[in-house]
Image (tube, grey):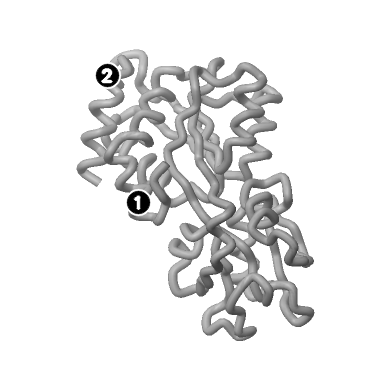
Amino acid sequence: MKRLMAAATLLLAVAGCGTSGGEQARTVTVLAAASLTEPFGAIERAFEAANPGVDVKISYQGSSALAQQIVNGAPADVFASADTENMDKVTGAGLADGTPTVFATNRLMIVVRPGNPKRITGLADLARADVTLVLCAPKVPCGAAARRAAGTTPLRPASEEQDVKAVLNKVRAGEADAGLVYVTDVRSAGAAVRGVDFPESAGAINRYPIAAISRAPRAGLGRAFLAMVTSPAGRAELDRFGFGAP
């Protein structure tokens, strides 16, 4: 935490956005993929602690929904996507300030209930008639990755969710036997679920880009937050929650 706070203070100063005077009580608005909830939460707390008067507001949703919000004019300073495709929608609309930076990677894992009562050992088991499966919707990064990984395996989800945390929560609540989420989501859930690796996930790695928004209300603060995410201290937080290096 101290390392993060020190990095936040330094980066905010370098960006020319110290918290004295007119910067007091300013807000930096970040739209981030739901899978980033844990590491971005830690970075948010450190950023605010190191810079009194700065309030970080993070909206976590599926990347496809967030990209559409930005294109539709929603105010934001920073966008962090779980795939490059949804970031491309923002850059294609001319709304990214500079070239997005890929700062992390993630891969899928099968998530099941504790004890794995359906004895799921791999992707083929998800197609069994006795398994209730939930997936992210195809337009959501975790859903697109799931279908890439599945290949010709016929997956028939009982529901298609709008972000990866919704898939995780349905399995955790016992509303589904299994789902496809990220390794990082399984780690964050702890003993509430169990993860099952499957080799096909290696063919569906997601790359996470981050960009400042060109019409950002608080451009300097946004750039400072982005710089913290991509700093060694930010990388350490991403590592701690299981994200791969870019």
- The local crowd at label 2, few if under 14, some if 14 to 19, many if 20 or more residues have their Cα within 10 Å, is few
Residue 59 seen in this snapshot:
no
Q: Is residue 233 above or below residue 53?
A: below
| Of marks 2 and 1, the one in the foreground | 1
Q: Residue at x 53, y 22 (%)?
A: 213
Q: Residue at x 53, y 84 (%)?
A: 115
Q: Residue at x 39, y 25 (%)?
A: 25
Residue at which label 1 appears: 239
Residue 25 seen in this snapshot:
yes
Cβ atoms under marks 2 and 1 closer than 8 Å: no
Q: Nearer the viewer, residue 80 or 44?
A: 80
Residue 82 location, x and y as percent?
55, 43
Q: Is residue 49 above or below residue 190?
A: above
The amino acid on which the numbered mark 1 sits, given as a three-letter code, is Asp
Quarter of the picture containing the C terminus is top left
Q: Nearer the viewer, residue 95 or 16?
A: 95
Q: CA distance from mark 2 to mark 1?
A: 25 Å
Q: Residue at x 51, y 18 (%)?
A: 97
Specify the quadrant of the image occupied by residue 119.
bottom right
- Indicate which disc residue 76 carries: none
Residue 150 location, x and y as percent?
68, 61
Residue at which label 2 appears: 14
Q: Is residue 1 left or right of residue 140?
A: left
Q: Is residue 114 left or right of residue 243?
A: right
The amino acid on which the numbered mark 2 sits, given as a three-letter code, is Val
2 or 1: tag closer to the N-terminus: 2
Q: Is residue 140 left or right of residue 76?
A: right
Q: Is residue 136 left or right of residue 24?
A: right
Element carrying mark 2: helix
Q: Nearer the viewer, residue 9 or 131?
A: 131
